[in-house]
């Protein structure tokens, strides 16, 4: 019996190749979208779950109040891990991590490595990064030891055994003591090199709660001890007030975050950029919605063929077929279509997944497709879709009355037509939602990219530097400025997109306990000029100001400060009276100038007080302002000068506007993904609309024939068939508008500086959807309108 059902199903599908191909196309596109997004969501949800001790590992987040400012950061001082282990019986072990770009050299190979990590000797006890070579207990025990990933070992040492070899980094030599497997992409701790924490100078200094540069993880003895430990930390830190300076309402404490919640649930940044669980919910909803659209398409397209197959069903019933036999026959056809669609979707996913990985910024392995959970999920999805998408058409077709359908007297029920129209409204409501969301996201990104930042980020080339080239840096700067295509060169601790806090600011007469936490950046005298900052009071740093902060005697330093408008306001002065005033930024000095507020952080945040102060050493970057003319030749000039003056440091550069764009990479990826899936949703919705239009036109063939006999034109017929569908799209627009307005307003609230949800965004989406719907319906309407009325009325 089953074999008979399958044979008949194949024959029917083969006879209707166009229907089969359209249905398979729509369903396979929908399934491909769902499969790709599901793999992405699965990858995001799997972050750090490969660690055996994942339930017992927590990250320590530092929270402190200074004056009126409360700050949370994902770094701590060196004292947290050892002090907590000594003090709290719940702590089994701890590990401190610090990421720091380093230049490594082996023989003639020289590279700047960004994925360079320092870690305590307990690193391999806490985390599950299995060593392929070396002893996990001793690999990082002691100074000047380093562990490499497989890929890095191959990069430097080829096929030779790297154990015992020496990698040089400036004046320091590291001995290779272990090889670890390549780090999984679903790890928030990414590295290619792990050097022993004992190699850092901080390891030889007294432990401190301050100088927060280290990411700290604790391994607890029991997974259920998190709340118990958390309740003990604040009381303990109060006992350390004399050491931490937590007086007059200020405080320093710590929060614990479970390892597996950091990537998606934490608001505090870490070693790698976090994602948001909100986006995971959004993408999960998109999976359900697109799958729903694909299934609705199948229902509408199958229903559209019901009149074509009515006589077939009637004849089968006359010959003795019962309803359940007909039901299973149509379910069999649905199963074949679903199975073919799933196979095609798997192939398309394998083809498109690498491109989606680039789009999403995540490395998703194709091996996921072969995992048992994925295969079982596909099988279950096939069964569910076959029944959900095939049941309504099967029930509809199997209940036809033989006598009526053989006479050609069959019309759908009102409830059936209402259901199909509701499904079209559902499809287009989703499409309109995605279109408006896409317009909003792209509009916000365009606003961010085109908003005046208060500084010029164009044509500024950034060259990282460190202590190894400090002796040559001034000479390099002088040589660079000789090129006429180079307008200015400046040295600074960091670029304006990554300026960090960590400083306290106050007026001299204000008690230290009432200091304000502010952001500050040490620079040279050309920083303001190179970035094009607007001085609104006072004057720029001079060479004299730079000389006032040079020499070995720090106590003799005389500081001058340039502050932004927000800092002046925070200090309680007006811009015009601030110049010449005294202020304290760790050390007392004089305000030399006030610059107009500029965006030195993401536009998710408001512009905070900023202090710029001079420094003659320990620069982190060199920024070169290019004219924009002869860029390739200018960059080649920079490379030649750099390599001649700093041959031990690789010439690796990027542009400042790339850094700026990187701040919004998550939003950019989301915008691109929404654009892609909004387009696909429209295509799928149009397929469903096409099916319903064909069904409606077939039902009204005789009516249209009579109207044409009575003088109706083709335009009249097209208008007649199209107006009902225009109403459906309008209803979908009314349903989608308040929902998407609420969702997008919520999303925009995360930005301090944002666009308004203008009426034209909604109007454009509605008009665009209406035009697409009319084009889809018009094809079928014109096809029906040009039929000779004699053919449609010959049986009357």
Image (cartoon, grey):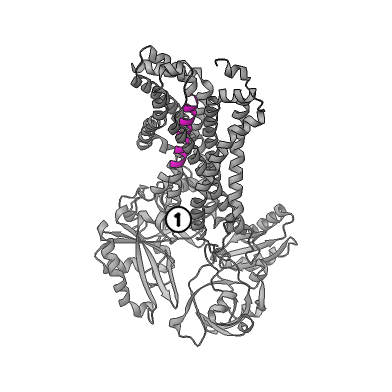
Towards the viewer: 685 or 70:
685
Residue 287 occupies which quadrant of the picture? Answer: top left
Towards the viewer: 29 or 522:
29
Extreme residue toward the top, this view: 319
Q: How many marks?
A: 1
How far from the left and from the top, in percent, is residue 269?
Answer: 45, 60
Residue at (61% x, 43% y) in the render: 768
- Camera sees residue 358: no
Q: Quadrant of the N terminus?
A: top left
Q: Is residue 538 left or right of residue 5?
A: right
Seen in the picture, residue 647 relative to 16 is either above or below; the reply is: below
Residue at (29% x, 56% y) in the render: 56
Seen in the picture, residue 293 relative to 394 is either above or below; the reply is: below
How far from the left and from the top, in percent, is residue 77?
Answer: 40, 69
Q: Please give the range of residues in magenta.
A: 288-305
Towards the viewer: 42 or 682:
682
How far from the left and from the top, in percent, is residue 455?
Answer: 64, 66
Seen in the picture, residue 633 relative to 590 is either above or below; the reply is: above
Q: Is residue 310 left or right of residue 657?
A: left
Magenta stretch, overall SS: helix
Residue 402 occupies which quadrant of the picture? Answer: top left
Q: Quadrant of the C terminus?
A: top right
Q: Is residue 397 magenta?
A: no
How far from the left and from the top, in percent, is residue 464?
Answer: 57, 61
Extreme residue toward the bottom, this view: 509
Which residue is identified by label 1? 274
Seen in the picture, residue 695 relative to 361 is either above or below; the reply is: above
Q: Secondary structure at mark 1?
A: loop
């Amino acid at each position: 019996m089953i074999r008979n059902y399958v044979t008949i199903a194949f024959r029917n599908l083969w006879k209707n190749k166009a229907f089969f191909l359209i249905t398979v196309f729509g369903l396979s596109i929908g399934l491909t979208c769902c499969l790709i997004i599901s793999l992405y969501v699965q990858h995001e949800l799997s972050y750090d779950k490969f660690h055996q001790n994942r339930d017992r590992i927590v990250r320590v987040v530092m929270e402190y109040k200074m004056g009126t400012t409360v700050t949370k950061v994902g770094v701590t001082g060196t004292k947290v891990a050892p002090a907590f282990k000594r003090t709290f019986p719940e702590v089994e072990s701890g590990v401190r991590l610090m990421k720091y770009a380093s230049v490594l050299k082996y023989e003639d190979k020289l590279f700047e490595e960004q994925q360079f990590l320092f870690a305590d000797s307990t690193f391999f006890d806490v985390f599950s990064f299995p060593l392929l070579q070396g002893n996990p207990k001793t690999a990082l025990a002691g100074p000047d030891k380093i562990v490499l990933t497989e890929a890095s070992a191959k990069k430097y040492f080829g096929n030779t055994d790297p154990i015992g070899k020496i990698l040089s980094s400036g004046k320091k030599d590291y001995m290779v003591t272990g090889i670890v497997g390549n780090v999984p992409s679903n790890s928030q701790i990414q590295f290619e090199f792990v050097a022993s924490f004992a190699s850092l100078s901080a390891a030889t200094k007294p432990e401190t709660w301050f100088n927060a540069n280290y990411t700290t993880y604790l391994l607890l003895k029991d997974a259920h001890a998190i709340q118990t430990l958390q309740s003990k930390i604040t009381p303990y830190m109060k006992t350390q007030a004399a050491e931490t300076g937590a007086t007059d309402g200020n405080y320093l404490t710590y929060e614990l975050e479970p390892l597996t919640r950091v990537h998606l649930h934490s608001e505090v940044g870490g070693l790698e950029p976090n994602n948001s669980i909100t986006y995971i919910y959004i993408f999960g909803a998109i999976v359900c919605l697109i799958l729903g659209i694909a299934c609705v398409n199948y229902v509408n397209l199958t229903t559209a063929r019901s009149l074509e197959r009515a006589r077939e069903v009637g004849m089968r019933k006359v010959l003795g077929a019962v309803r359940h036999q007909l039901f299973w026959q149509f379910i069999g056809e649905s199963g074949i279509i679903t199975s073919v669609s799933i196979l095609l979707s798997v192939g398309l996913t394998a083809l498109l997944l690498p491109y989606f990985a680039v789009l999403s910024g995540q490395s998703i392995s194709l091996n996921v497709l072969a995992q048992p959970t994925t295969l079982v999920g596909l099988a279950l999805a096939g069964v569910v879709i076959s029944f959900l998408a095939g049941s309504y058409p099967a029930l509809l077709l199997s209940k036809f009355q033989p006598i009526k359908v053989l006479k050609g007297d069959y019309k759908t029920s009102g409830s059936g037509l209402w259901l199909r129209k509701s499904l079209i409204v559902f499809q287009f409501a989703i499409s309109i939602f995605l279109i408006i969301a896409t317009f909003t996201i792209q509009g916000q990104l365009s606003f961010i990219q085109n908003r005046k930042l208060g500084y010029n980020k164009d044509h500024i080339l950034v060259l990282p530097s460190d202590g190894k080239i400090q002796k040559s840096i001034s000479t390099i700067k002088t040589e660079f400025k000789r090129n006429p295509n180079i307008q200015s060169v400046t040295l600074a601790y960091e670029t304006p997109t990554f300026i960090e806090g960590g400083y306290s600011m106050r007026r001299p007469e204000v008690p230290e306990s009432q200091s304000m936490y502010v952001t500050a950046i040490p620079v040279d005298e050309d920083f303001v000029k190179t970035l094009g900052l607007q001085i609104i009071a006072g004057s720029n740093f001079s060479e004299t100001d730079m000389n006032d902060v040079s020499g070995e005697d720090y106590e003799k330093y005389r500081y001058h400060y340039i502050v932004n408008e927000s800092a002046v306001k925070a200090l309680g002065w007006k811009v015009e009276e601030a110049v010449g005033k005294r202020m304290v930024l760790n050390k007392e000095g004089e305000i030399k100038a006030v610059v107009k507020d500029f965006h030195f952080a993401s536009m998710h945040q408001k512009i905070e007080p900023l202090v710029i102060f001079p420094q003659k050493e320990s620069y982190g970057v060199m920024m070169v302002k290019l004219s924009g003319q002869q860029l390739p030749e200018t960059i080649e000039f920079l490379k030649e000068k750099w390599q001649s003056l700093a041959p031990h440091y690789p010439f690796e550069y990027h542009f400042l506007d790339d850094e700026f764009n990187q701040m919004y990479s998550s939003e950019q990826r989301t915008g691109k993904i929404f654009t892609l899936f909004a387009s696909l949703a429209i295509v799928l919705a149009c397929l469903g609309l096409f099916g319903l239009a064909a069904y409606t036109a077939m039902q009204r063939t005789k009516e249209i024939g009579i109207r044409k006999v009575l003088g109706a034109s083709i335009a009249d017929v097209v208008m007649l068939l199209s107006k009902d569908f225009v109403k459906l799209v309008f209803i979908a627009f009314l349903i989608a508008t308040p929902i998407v307005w609420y969702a997008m307003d919520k999303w925009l609230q995360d930005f301090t500086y944002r666009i308004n949800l203008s009426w034209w965004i909604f109007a454009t989406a509605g008009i665009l959807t209406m035009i697409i719907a009319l084009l889809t319906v018009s094809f079928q309407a014109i096809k029906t309108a040009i039929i000779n009325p004699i053919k449609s009325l010959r049986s009357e």
